[in-house]
Image (cartoon, rainbow, N blue to C red):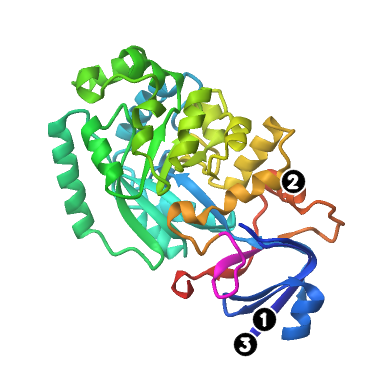
């Protein structure tokens, strides 16, 4: 049975148009038509009126769901090497805490925030069941790390065994093995993982990463030494972390954070085709800095938004990260920021992010309360600033893609 919803504004999402006084027709959760109200209702009947902006469901392209039980336990502001040490200590202190209830609650919060697809990073694969239960698609990047060849052999063997015994992911959710970062993953193994297919890499999150890669100095050098390795064992020298890996990046890779970039780094990322995932609230909390959004946009770098974990971010609502970027870069229109939330392709969920007939991307309503809206993109950022819950009109269904 066809359902029709009309609204003052319809945003069709990635590559789609903007329809004032528009309508969407659905067969179950599958999009049948989207466009001007008189055209859609003329073909499919009068719709239910929503005083709202209707839009495709959102993508949170970088989170660590399995760390949800560590919310509020790790202080920030001293830079990434110091934060990692505090994080490791917090994880040890909470090792007897069952993380599953916090993960289940956080997955439900993702749905309330309008998220239909994720790029989740996991060491344990414990996030796979709660993401599936919440009806969320995308990729779980099973992260492996080790600073020596011997440690990487063990880490990869452990990962294979964990994958073998883990429950199968829900439809639309895949698991891939992925490196962590240049300072934590033995370089030849990191390159092999990147060559193997899709992956997610924490990259250029802090200036200390550049110091470590270029001169084996700084906080990461000390951290690696305490982990029982010498910097030269981990990686070769390079001008920057981006320069170290750029030739191995491909469009199916995510590089996450990318806060410490110079102009040459931006150009290298643009040539690679990899998607840069920005996590501005986490970056501000840990490093006290934000990515060079204006330079990345100007260079045409593919972008997406993520929240990082609740250990470094107050919520898993990616729209709130778009709000921070808008406040920090007021010259960049909201109409350029909101589409960064629809990059389902980047996380292996290409059906999410656009209202395309034949697909079920998930359809959201952001209620306006009946107030007139002149700019639906600006309205969404105002809506997101209060982190109000979306109304789901249809859920994502990968099997229809």
Is 76 placed above or below 376 here?
Answer: above
> What residue did someone put label 3 on?
1
Q: Where's residue 150, x and y in %? A: 12, 33
Q: Is residue 158 above or below residue 257?
A: below
Query: Start and end of the magenta stretch?
Result: 353-365
The label shown at residue 3 is: 1
Total numbered labels placed on residues in the image: 3
The residue identified by callout 2 is: 382
Mark 3, other Cα within 10 Å: few <14 / some 14–19 / many ≥20: few
> Relative to residue 211, is residue 275 drawn left or right?
right
Secondary structure of the residue carrying numbered label 2: helix
- Look at the image and tell me in which quarter the N terminus lies: bottom right
Q: Position of residue 138 (x, y in %)?
A: 43, 57
Magenta span: predominant SS is: loop
Q: Are marks 1 and 3 in contact (CB under 8 Å)?
A: yes
Q: CA distance from mark 2 to mark 1?
A: 29 Å
Query: What is the crowding at mark 2: few (fewer than 14 residues within 10 Å), some, or many (at least 20)?
Result: some
């Amino acid at each position: 049975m066809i359902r029709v919803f009309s609204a003052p504004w319809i945003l069709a999402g990635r590559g789609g148009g903007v329809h004032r006084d528009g309508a969407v027709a659905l067969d179950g959760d599958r999009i049948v038509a989207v466009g001007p109200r008189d055209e859609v209702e003329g073909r499919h009947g009068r719709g239910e009126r929503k005083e709202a902006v209707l839009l495709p469901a959102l993508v949170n392209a970088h989170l660590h769901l399995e760390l949800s039980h560590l919310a509020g336990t790790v202080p920030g502001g001293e830079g990434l090497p110091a934060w990692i040490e505090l994080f490791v200590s917090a994880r040890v202190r909470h090792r007897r805490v069952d993380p599953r209830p916090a993960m289940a609650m956080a997955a439900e919060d993702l749905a309330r925030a309008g998220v239909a697809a994720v790029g989740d990073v996991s060491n344990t694969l414990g996030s796979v069941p709660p993401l599936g239960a919440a009806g969320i698609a995308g990729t779980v990047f099973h992260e492996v790390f080790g600073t020596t060849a011997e440690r990487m052999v063990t880490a990869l063997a452990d990962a294979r065994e964990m994958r073998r015994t883990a429950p199968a992911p829900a439809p639309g959710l895949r698991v891939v093995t992925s490196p962590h970062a240049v300072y934590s993953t033995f370089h030849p193994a990191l390159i092999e993982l990147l060559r193997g297919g899709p992956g997610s890499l924490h990259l250029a999150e802090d200036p200390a990463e550049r110091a470590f890669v270029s001169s084996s100095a700084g906080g990461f050098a000390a951290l690696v030494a305490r982990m029982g390795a010498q910097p030269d064992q981990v990686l070769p020298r390079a001008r920057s972390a981006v320069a170290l890996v750029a030739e191995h990046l491909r469009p199916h890779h995510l590089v996450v954070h990318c806060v410490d970039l110079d102009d040459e780094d931006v150009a290298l990322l643009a040539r690679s085709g990899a998607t840069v995932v920005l996590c501005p609230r986490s970056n501000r909390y840990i490093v006290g800095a934000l990515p060079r959004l204006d330079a990345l946009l100007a260079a045409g770098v593919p972008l997406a938004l993520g929240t990082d974990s609740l250990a470094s971010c107050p919520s898993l609502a990616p729209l709130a990260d778009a709000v921070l970027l808008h406040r920090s870069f007021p010259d960049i229109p909201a109409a350029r920021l909101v589409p960064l939330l629809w990059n389902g392709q980047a996380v292996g969920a290409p059906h999410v992010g656009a209202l395309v007939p034949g697909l079920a991307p998930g359809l959201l309503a952001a209620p306006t309360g009946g107030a007139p809206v002149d700019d639906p993109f600006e309205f969404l950022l105002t809506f997101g600033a209060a982190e109000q819950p979306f109304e789901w009109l249809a859920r994502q269904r990968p099997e229809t893609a």
